[in-house]
Image (cartoon, coloured by chain):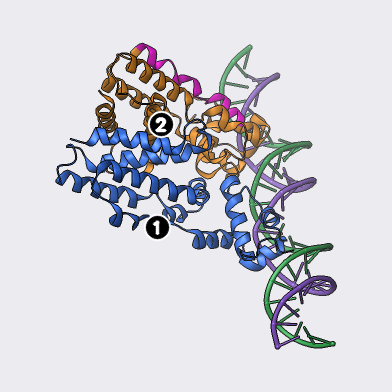
Chain colours: A blue, B orange, C green, D purple
Amino acid sequence: MSEDSSISNSDKLLLAAIDLIASKGYKGVTTQEIAAAAGFSEKTLFRHFGSKQNLLEAAFDRFHYAEEMTRLFDEKLIWDLQADLLLISRTYHEIMNRNRKMIMISVKEADNLPGFSERTLKHPRQFISILTNYFTVMAGKGKLTDVNPEIQAYSFISMNYGVFANNLDIGTISIETFIKESVQTFTRGLTP
Amino acid sequence: MSEDSSISNSDKLLLAAIDLIASKGYKGVTTQEIAAAAGFSEKTLFRHFGSKQNLLEAAFDRFHYAEEMTRLFDEKLIWDLQADLLLISRTYHEIMNRNRKMIMISVKEADNLPGFSERTLKHPRQFISILTNYFTVMAGKGKLTDVNPEIQAYSFISMNYGVFANNLDIGTISIETFIKESVQTFTRGLTP
DNA sequence: AATGACTGTCAGTACTTACTGACATTTAAA
DNA sequence: TTTAAATGTCAGTAAGTACTGACAGTCATT
């Protein structure tokens, strides 16, 4: 009666830890709770990871995500403002949602576990710098109004981050409709 | 040699509590720490508030802020898109920054202290609904393109929230320059 | 059948922390 | 000076929690 043979026992513990720490905080959850949520005894947790700290660090090492931001772009951008902003926005939400729990941990434990949130994001500067470069090139092509590329990139990413951070309670508005409408506004605002 | 006679001892404790809980979390800070930061003994803290929970609730009751969102508008809006968005954006950042620590507490303790974050914000729906109404009226006046007012309001507020949430580490970009540039983009994107 | 890798149980240790009681001390007003 | 209210000190309790050691059970492989 194995419950999920495709996933190792260590990973079960890691996933339970991420789940609980993301919602209750590192200090708000006990090793007993984590083990029980994963379907094991507390002893097994310590046999696998040695300490609660190690458990968190193992979770980070195994489920980090910072790198996957970069490559999706250079290949797929077609230098059409609306199409590219749509791609960027959709990619951003896809990555952020896939890693929502780890991001929540970073936000909550920023001051408790120094170095942790630095490694994981700072809301992906990569995204901002890539988008800044993109805007700069577009301006060179004459396809952008005379604006500050960095601030525009910062505004666009911040908007998407704000939506991501609140998306528990949107309800009436779907992410996709938001993306289409906001991209349209930015496109209209930035096209010469 | 009283250190700050303009503020009561209870309030000193409350402010120290807000300060520390905002950065280290409710479970991450001890009553000993809070009392020491306020310049008192731990005993005094318990004489004033009875329990750690009471301390947090007293802090909320005394330093809530939800209501001050509403009234600033109806008086000051002049039905010029750019000027009004500037006012709204500046007002938003002023209120949010003034209450930054309480907001941090709401974000961090959302799952630990149920009912707390509900009372305090959900990032001010008031702001969104006011802005939605504003856009609707502007559309009626023929001063807005044919867009969904609610989504536009949501986008604009989310963008400002995203900037607010990250503003620890902006560095090169000042809030004011961001406000001006982002308002200009929205104005251009939404003006017929 | 025997082995080895993994898990569970249980009792217990060491440390932290919210919270209390008794008593002394300060401070300001009467 | 007396009094009352607030604070400090100190010792201590009760509960929670990370973590350990000893021992036993399970199960697949040989």
Q: Which residues are magenta?
A: B57-75
Query: Of discs 1 and 2, which sits in the foreground?
Result: 1
Q: Quick one: A42 or B65, which is closer to the camera?
A: A42
Q: Quick one: B54 or A170, which is closer to the camera?
A: A170
Q: What residue does disc 1 label?
A: A68
Q: Answer whether residue A52 is visible to the viewer in this image.
A: no
Q: x%, y% of residue A125?
A: 34, 50
Return the mark for residue B151.
none
Q: x%, y% of residue B32?
A: 60, 43
Q: Amino acid at mark 2?
A: Asn
Q: Secondary structure at mark 2?
A: helix
Q: Answer whether residue A151 is visible to the viewer in this image.
A: yes
**Mark 1 to mark 2 CA distance (whole Å):** 33 Å
Q: Are marks 1 and 2 on the same chain?
A: no
Q: Is residue A182 left or right of residue B103?
A: left
- Which chain does the residue under circle 1 lie in? A
Return the mark for residue B97.
2
Q: Quick one: B27 or A125, which is closer to the camera?
A: A125
Q: Secondary structure at mark 1?
A: helix
